[in-house]
Image (spheres, helix red, strand yellow):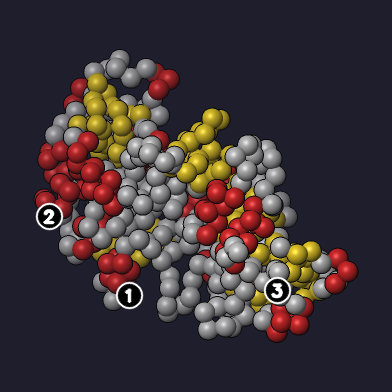
């Protein structure tokens, strides 16, 4: 784990730790919670052959949509990509391998990894198409299926406020997958609009304790404006 | 004269009881917000992680980090909470959401629902529909009675991949309100201007109809 006093760094240095072929969890449900500045730096630095794990594929010209459009993503593990026609086209053309899970199972597979477990048992999806790919068993007289946990090499997280130790606080519905992914990946890079000195966040205001976070960077809120434009519904 | 959709929404809104926790699916069901009386005390759940959302008031500036699962900017009402996605689905799987409304490609007389995939044509992913369909006690389907080619959507047996088996409680279309019962699919309300013969002709499922008890909407 990274030492407490060595976590606060620059966007460039943090993203430079990611090699080609890495698996990366990316926070966000649609735009809120998506770490746009970290993703744009990943696009600029050129890493390729990536596996991304994100609830959705953003939209074609923002967030992970930019990485998919640039051909840098080989595989996407997700729940719903209906708002990204480019991702759907790449999937249909066989250029992007897409693995889809019901949203709550995806969240739980990540939460489970973050809790240090290998998987869990569930009755969700029995008697549907998704049941065909799973191992089923009986527990206490009830049928259920094994859902393995999902881990990743990296997680890219968006928080509202952080401190330099890596404590994180989220805001509104930007929480979504972020605290789960921050616990499930081997190396965690978090961006925040504000980074305080230790003590700047009250202990009870911390959603993700710093023990799970390797690197913290401060980003300008304007870097997330792409998401604001995309969501003017 | 209200449109078909307006009548369906007004009828469906009667299924929401004071004090309940309600999930509104993407699309038509989201419009139910505008059919609930203003003083109705309910909390609306959105699966991205909010309980107690409401449409953004006119002239209110949107908060960029506050959306519903359809991607629309929202506000919150007193008593609201926000939480992560794992907790949001724990709330669903533990059946703490009382009633949910969603659309359908097909529904059948056993209450099976198909609304996420048309093999070879449409497969953007299932999102939160599977867990909502399987675990929310009362699932109300809001859909057109027939597809755009006139084919029935209320079937004897679903043909598309299921969202969940035996999960639907009530179906509201522009022609009728139908309840899934142990005996089969029972018509409880007929839309104004629709008669029993034309309803049967537009439906593949076997319908149980007791004309002496039929309501109108």
Residue B107 image offset from top left, x and y in percent:
63, 71
In this rendering, would B22 be left or right of B185?
left
Q: Quadrant of residue B42?
A: top right
Label 1 sits on residue: A92
Q: Nearer the viewer, residue A115 or B59?
A: B59
Under circle 1, the secondary element is: helix
**What residue is at 58 percent from the left and 71 percent from the top?**
B144
Q: Which mark is residue A111?
A: none
Q: From the viewer's perspective, is A230 left or right of B118?
A: left
Name the quarter where the N terminus of chain A is drawn.
top left
**Label 1 to label 2, Cα distance in Å?**
24 Å
Q: Which residue is mark 2?
A: A46
How crowded pointer 3 is (Cα within 10 Å; few <14, some 14-19, many 20+) is rated as few
Marks 1 & 3 on one chain: no
The residue under label 3 is B193
**Mark 3 belongs to chain:** B
Q: Is residue B79 left or right of residue A20?
A: right
The image shows residue A209 at horizontal and vertical percentages of 37, 27
Q: Determine the residue positioned at 36% across, 52% down.
A: A233
Relative height, residue B187 to residue A64 (above, below): below
Front residue of B217/A166: it is B217
Residue B107 sits above or below residue B83 on the image: below
The reply to whether residue A102 is in sight is no
Q: Judge if badges 3 and 2 mark residues of a common chain.
A: no
- Residue A17 x %, y %: 16, 43
| Subunit ID for the residue under disc 1 | A
Q: Secondary structure at mark 3?
A: loop
Measure the alpha-carbon separation of dots 1 and 3.
Answer: 44 Å
Separation of marks 3 and 2 at Cα, in angstroms: 63 Å
Whether callout 1 and callout 2 share a subunit is answered yes
């Amino acid at each position: 784990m990274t030492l407490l006093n060595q976590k606060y760094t620059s966007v460039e240095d943090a993203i430079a730790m990611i090699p080609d072929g890495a698996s990366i969890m990316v926070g966000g449900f649609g735009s809120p919670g998506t770490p746009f500045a970290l993703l744009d730096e990943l696009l600029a630095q050129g890493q390729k052959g990536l596996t991304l794990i994100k609830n959705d594929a953003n939209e074609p010209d923002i967030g992970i949509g930019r990485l998919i459009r640039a051909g840098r993503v080989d595989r996407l593990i997700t729940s719903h990509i209906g708002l990204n026609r480019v991702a759907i086209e790449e999937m249909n053309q066989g250029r992007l391998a897409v693995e889809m899970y019901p949203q709550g199972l995806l969240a739980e597979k990540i939460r489970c990894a973050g809790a240090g477990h290998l998987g869990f048992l569930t009755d969700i999806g029995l008697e549907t198409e998704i049941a065909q790919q799973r191992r089923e068993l009986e527990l206490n007289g009830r049928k259920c299926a094994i859902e393995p946990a999902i881990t990743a090499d990296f997680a890219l997280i968006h928080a509202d406020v952080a401190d330099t130790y890596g404590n994180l606080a989220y805001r509104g519905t930007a929480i979504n997958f972020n605290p789960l992914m921050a616990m499930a990946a081997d190396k965690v890079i978090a961006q925040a609009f504000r980074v305080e000195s230790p003590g700047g966040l009250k202990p009870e205001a911390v959603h993700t304790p710093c023990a799970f976070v390797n690197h913290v960077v401060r980003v300008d809120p304007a870097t997330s404006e792409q998401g604001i434009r995309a969501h003017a519904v | 004269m209200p449109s078909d959709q307006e009548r369906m929404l007004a009828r469906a809104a009667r299924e929401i009881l004071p004090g309940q926790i309600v999930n509104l699916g993407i699309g038509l069901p989201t419009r139910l917000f505008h059919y609930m009386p203003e003083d109705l005390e309910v909390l609306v759940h959105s699966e991205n992680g909010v309980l107690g959302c409401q449409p953004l008031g006119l002239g209110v500036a949107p908060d960029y980090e506050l959306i519903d699962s359809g991607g629309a900017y929202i506000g919150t009402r007193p008593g609201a909470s926000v939480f992560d996605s794992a907790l949001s689905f724990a709330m669903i799987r533990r059946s703490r959401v009382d009633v949910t409304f969603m659309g359908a490609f097909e529904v059948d007389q056993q209450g099976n629902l198909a609304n996420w995939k048309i093999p070879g044509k449409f497969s953007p992913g299932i999102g939160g529909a599977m867990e909502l369909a399987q675990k929310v006690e009362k699932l109300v389907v809001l859909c057109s009675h027939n597809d755009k080619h006139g084919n029935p959507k209320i079937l004897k047996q679903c043909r598309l991949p299921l969202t969940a088996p035996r999960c639907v409680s009530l179906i509201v279309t522009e022609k009728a309100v139908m309840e899934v019962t142990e005996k089969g699919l029972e018509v409880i309300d007929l839309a104004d201007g629709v008669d029993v013969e034309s309803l049967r002709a537009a439906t593949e499922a076997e319908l149980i109809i007791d004309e002496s008890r039929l309501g109108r909407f």
